[in-house]
Amino acid sequence: MKCAIFLAKGFEDCEALITIDMLRRADIEVDSVSITDDLKVESSHGVTLFADRLWKEINPSSYTALILPGGKLGTENLGAFEPLRDVFMKHWQEEKLTCAICAAPSLFGKWGILKGRRYTCFPDFYSPDYEGNYQMELAVQDRNLITARGMGATIEFARLIIRDLSNEANLKRVEYGMQYEHSFRVYSNQ
């Protein structure tokens, strides 16, 4: 199991970092990947992060899950990077786990990935043109598609990814380790 989360200038800090953190707590390998020729990527709130890999260094087909964080500018920059579209479309068509949060599901909508699927995104990025079934939920999974509404939904987003790639016991272990109230009572009484 190996995941890639793609970073572009303007990515939403928490949507990327909490997702990376939770996946690594679950012992799921995750590479942060800069879509530019520079490992340094500036977030939407001016935090500079050093990605693990450069786009030109990876083989996208080697990943079990592909993930896009949101952020308005970050999403615009991800969308402007045309090779990303082809990689996500191939991944999606192979029925591999395809994930996006906040503004980033709008890219899936433009690429046709949301058609006929249940999904969510930041409400301002919803469009009937996506031909999907928009849900006003924190995070939604429809088969190999996981989407979430925004920064406040990041824990739920990462939970769904972990649950899909691992198992319920591992998810509960991660939740207990971060003192996530949702499962605290269940795990601590075992």
Image (cartoon, helix red, strand yellow):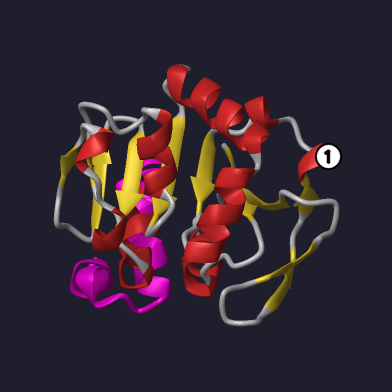
State the image coordinates of residue 63 (x, y, percent, origin top left): 61, 33
- Let me know if residue 29 appears in the view: no
- Tell me the residue that label 1 is attached to: 57
Categorize mark 1 by other alpha carbons within 10 Å: few (<14), some (14-19), many (20+). few
50 left or right, relative to 26: right
Residue 123, quarter of picture? bottom left
Which residue lies most toward the top here?
94
State the image coordinates of residue 35 (x, y, percent, origin top left): 72, 49
- Let me know if residue 104 appears in the view: yes
Instruction: Please say whether residue 26 is one of the residues in the magenta stretch.
Output: no
Q: Residue at x 36, y 44 (%)?
A: 167
State the image coordinates of residue 181 (x, y, percent, origin top left): 24, 77
What residue range appears in magenta?
A: 161-190
Which residue is at the front of the view, 143 or 71?
Answer: 71
Does 48 sit above or below residue 9? below
Residue 74, quarter of picture? bottom right
Classify the position of the C terminus by image quarter.
Answer: bottom left
165 left or right, relative to 59: left
Residue 13, quarter of picture? bottom right
State the image coordinates of residue 71 (x, y, percent, origin top left): 48, 65
Magenta span dominant secondary structure: helix
Q: Residue at x 57, y 81 (%)?
A: 45
Amino acid type, residue under disc 1 in the picture: Glu
109 left or right, relative to 22: left
Instruction: Please say whether residue 179 is one of the residues in the magenta stretch.
Output: yes
